[in-house]
Amino acid sequence: MKSFRNSLKWALPAVVVFMAGSLILSRVIKPDPEPAPEVSIEAHEASDYAGSFAEVCGLVVQATHATNIGGNPVFLNFGDVHPNQDFTVVIWERYHRRWDRPIHPQFEGQPVCVEGEIRMHEGRPQIEVNRPENVRIMLH
């Protein structure tokens, strides 16, 4: 019993110091903000800007939650349905909880702008999104 009390005498203050330090650092160290988009383009132009941080806008013609694919992504396809889409937004399941409601129903059929780095995947341009702030419905 004495050994346990001696351990607590040292462990408890160490835990308190660690937690206080973590709290202070979380308030001081901020992640780097994402850069402003280099260009603002239409979805059909996205493949010309692979590697750029861009704002891509267009009509979401297909929005699906692909539960049959590892990572359970939501795909927002612009211009046409898969596999003929002009551009795709990918939102992996690990980020879905950041949205306040299911993702795919709110964007299908909507004019949408998305910000991020355009990357090519299987010959098609896409942006992977992990924050709701990076996807917005355009006002009509």
Image (tube, rainbow, N blue to C red):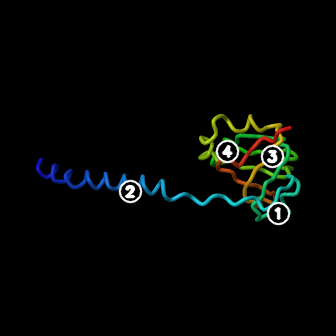
Q: Which residue is mark 1?
A: 49
Q: Nearer the viewer's eye, disc 2 or disc 4?
A: 2
Residue positioned 63% across, 36% down in the render = 100
- Judged by depth in the image, the label closer to the viewer, 3 or 4, is 4
Alpha carbon distance from label 2 to label 4: 30 Å
Residue 53, by quadrant, is bottom right
How far is disc 3 from disc 1 in space, using C-alphas? 17 Å
Nearest the viewer among 16 and 114 is: 16
Q: Position of residue 135 (x, y in %)?
A: 73, 46
Say which residue appears at 45% left-offset and 57% top-offset. Answer: 25
Q: Residue flagged by tag 3: what amino acid is it? A: Asn
User: Callout 2: 10 Å neighbours few (<14), some, many (20+)?
Assistant: few
Q: What is the spatial separation of the Cα atoms under label 4 and label 1, in whole angstroms?
A: 22 Å
Pointers 2 and 1 in contact (C-beta within 8 Å): no
Kind of residue at badge 2:
Gly
Left or right: 107 as drawn, with respect to 95: right
The residue at which mark 2 appears reads as 21
Q: Mark 3 or 1 closer to N-term?
A: 1
**Earlier-in-chain disc, 3 versus 4:** 3
